[in-house]
Amino acid sequence: MLNEALKKLEDDLEVYDMILLVEPEGDGAEGDLTRRFLSSQIFRQSEKKVLILSAEKNKELAELYYTYEFSDKVRMIGGDKQHGDLLNLIDSGLIAEQEAFELILR
């Protein structure tokens, strides 16, 4: 099963510029932030071909993400409060939301 996930990842990386694994988030501000990113003008106007996958529904791929550093083409976004991430920087006011959205797609 892991071999199938790896093969699918390799195939997807040939087609897409970036793969975003979206972690499940809680209700309220955390979940709203990912939804705002996905509906933002920055995301919609990006020329990059982006595949968006649920990390929860693609557990094998998420495991590969955590185990190996493939490239900057596979990224995880979500609201993991235990570890610092880009969305936590927005919540703390260290960067603006639009800046974070631009960084995700960079």
Image (tube, rainbow, N blue to C red):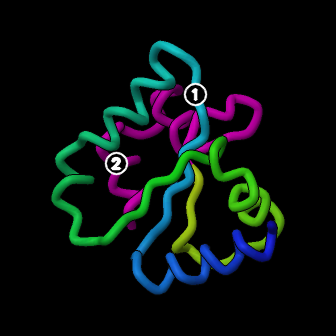
Residue under the point 45% across and 70% down? 18
Given the current orientation, which residue lies at the most extreme bottom position?
A: 14
The span picked out in magenta is 77-106
Left or right, 95 with reference to 102: right
- Of 9 and 80, the residue lying toward us: 9
Q: Which residue is mark 1?
A: 25
Badge nearest the viewer, 1 or 2: 1
For badge 1, the amino acid type reads: Glu
Report x, y in % for residue 74: 57, 67
Query: Which residue corresponds to the image point at 51% horizontal and 52% vertical from the top-left?
Result: 53
Whether residue 94 appears in magenta in the rendering, the answer is yes
Could you tell me how far apart the alpha carbons at marks 1 and 2 are, in whole angstroms?
A: 20 Å
Q: Is 96 included in the stretch rendered in magenta?
A: yes
Question: Tag 1's secondary structure?
Answer: loop
Name the residue at 75% across, 58% down. 60
Q: Quadrant of residue 81?
A: top right
In the image: residue 46, left or right of residue 72: left
Disc 1 and disc 2 in contact, CB within 8 angstroms: no
In this picture, is 101 found above or below 28?
Answer: below
Viewer-nearest residue: 75 or 81: 75
Q: Position of residue 89 (x, y in %)?
A: 53, 37
Q: Position of residue 45 (x, y in %)?
A: 16, 59
Earlier-in-chain disc, 1 versus 2 = 1
Coordinates of residue 93 in the picture (x, y in percent): 45, 29
- Which residue is tagged 2? 99
Q: Is residue 65 left or right of residue 27?
A: right
79 left or right of 103?
A: right
- At mark 2, the secondary structure is helix
Q: Amino acid at mark 2?
A: Glu
Split into 4 quadrants, where in the image is the C terminus?
Answer: bottom left
